[in-house]
Image (spheres, grey):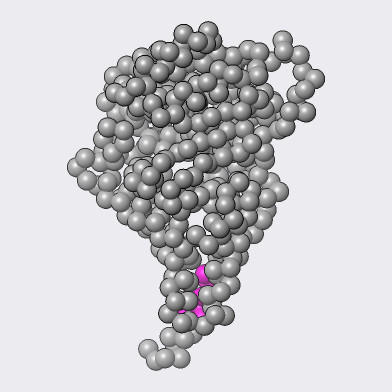
């Protein structure tokens, strides 16, 4: 192949990458309009206390001494007239149990239960959530992680959202508190997947299960719909139980949604680069259903769309090739940062975000095919097909 042919291939390569990024930019711009937010207080201000349905708030907790008190206290202080809270202590070996015992003496509508041993074939979080569901008495169920903190009006906003949109299930994206560079670099990739790769209106309007998304930090169910699909038993062996439960709900004809909850819920998901890497390694490959060709293709996309343009720029390639690509990626990150209350300088992080995500993807595949499997919170999970 001669030099002119190579130049033609390079032109084609850059056209394909630029075109792909423009499509993703279009999805991002559309989601600025279509990505719903939890409703504000004026929507429910005239509603009488007796008209609010009962809500069961369900919190799985395993070694959560760093955050469990803030989470439970924020839930116990909800401005909502008809709810109860159940926290399951899932074999914690730190101070979680002691902290929960103290909280239970202070809040009458808080119940703390001790989890049963993990059965064969179950993932820890799904087993904990299944046990919690058996303690529920509400018309609505909220499963929320122990590292979340909730504004006092969160339950009122969630009930209003579910009733106004006739939703059987919805999940939300909280405000993510970011500390270390690893958190700033990697965690917003989740926001990008939600906001740049999936038109949000299709989650509600399109019946294909492939147009499904969820965030396990906050999962809201109409109880009857949850029971109709078998609850967490339907995803008992799924490491990424939130996304697969959303698919199960949609596959059963239920109405689902993913919304912006940054004004109501806060979360510090991880606190170090190691936690970020391990946490996302647990989810990356399983999140694709252990589809190796698709996972590999996505990592190639990350390289070609976000990492290679910076490499070409540093290597002295034509600015006409790479500047538009870097600018489009930066524009997407800037819009996402502004929408979800993250720093403006995230607009310059996408090459680092993509590179780190690729390393996480490789590690996730390595874990899946190792003898120990994925590692999380003292448990090992072998590579298995998700139901």
- Residue nearest the observer in this picture, 98 or 133: 98
Residue at (49, 85) in percent of width and height: 8
Residue sticking out furthest to the left: 371
Mark yes or no: residue 383 visible: no
In the rendered view of the protein, which quadrant contains the N terminus?
A: bottom left
Question: How far across and down, in percent of the image, does residue 167 sit?
Answer: 64, 29
Residue at (45, 38) in percent of width and height: 269
Report the span colored magenta.
Answer: 9-18
Question: How far across and down, in percent of the image, does residue 319 sit?
Answer: 54, 80
Residue at (34, 56) in percent of width and height: 359
* Magenta span includes 109: no
Residue at (66, 13) in percent of width and height: 81
Q: Is residue 190 left or right of residue 153?
A: left
Which corner quadrant of the image does residue 271 belong to? top left
Q: Say above or below: 276 vs 138.
A: below
Q: Is residue 112 left or right of residue 76?
A: left
Question: How far across and down, in percent of the image, does residue 227 sit?
Answer: 51, 20
Q: Say above or below: 326 vs 144.
A: below
- Residue nearest the observer in this picture, 248 or 174: 174
Mark yes or no: residue 114 visible: yes
Which corner quadrant of the image does residue 153 belong to? top right
Question: How far across and down, in percent of the image, does residue 321 sit?
Answer: 54, 78
Which corner quadrant of the image does residue 27 belong to? bottom right
């Amino acid at each position: 192949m001669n030099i002119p042919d190579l130049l033609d291939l390079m032109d084609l390569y850059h056209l394909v990458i630029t075109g792909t990024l423009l499509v993703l930019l279009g999805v991002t711009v559309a989601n600025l309009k279509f990505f719903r937010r939890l409703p504000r207080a004026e929507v429910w201000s005239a509603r009488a206390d007796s008209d609010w349905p009962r809500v069961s708030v369900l919190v799985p907790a395993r070694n959560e001494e760093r955050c469990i008190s803030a989470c439970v206290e924020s839930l116990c202080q909800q401005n909502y007239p008809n709810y109860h809270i159940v926290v399951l202590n899932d074999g914690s070996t730190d101070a979680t149990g002691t902290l929960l015992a103290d909280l239970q003496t202070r809040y009458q509508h808080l119940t703390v239960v001790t989890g049963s041993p993990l059965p064969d074939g179950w993932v820890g979080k799904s087993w904990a959530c299944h046990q919690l569901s058996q303690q529920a008495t509400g018309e609505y169920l909220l499963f929320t992680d122990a590292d979340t903190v909730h504004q006092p009006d969160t339950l009122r906003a969630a009930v209003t959202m579910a009733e106004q949109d006739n939703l059987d299930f919805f999940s939300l994206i909280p405000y993510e508190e970011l500390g270390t560079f690893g958190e700033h670099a990697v965690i917003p990739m989740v926001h990008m997947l939600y906001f740049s790769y999936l038109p949000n209106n299709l989650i509600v309007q399109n019946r294909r299960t492939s147009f499904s998304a969820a965030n396990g930090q906050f999962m809201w169910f109409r109880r009857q719909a949850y029971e109709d699909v078998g609850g967490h038993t339907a995803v008992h062996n799924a490491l990424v139980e939130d996304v697969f439960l959303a698919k199960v709900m949609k596959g059963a004809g239920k109405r689902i949604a993913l919304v912006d909850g940054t004004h109501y819920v806060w979360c510090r998901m991880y606190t170090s680069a190691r936690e970020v890497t391990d946490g996302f390694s647990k989810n990356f490959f399983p999140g694709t259903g252990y589809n190796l060709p698709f996972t590999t293709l996505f990592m190639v996309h990350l390289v070609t769309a976000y990492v290679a343009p910076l490499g070409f720029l540093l290597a002295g390639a034509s600015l006409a090739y790479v500047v538009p690509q870097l600018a489009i990626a930066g524009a997407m990150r800037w819009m996402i940062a502004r929408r979800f209350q993250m720093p403006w300088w995230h607009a310059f992080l996408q090459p680092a975000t993509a590179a780190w995500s690729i390393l996480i993807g490789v590690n996730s595949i390595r874990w899946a095919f190792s003898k120990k499997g994925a590692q999380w919170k003292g448990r090992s999970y072998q590579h298995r097909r998700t139901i």
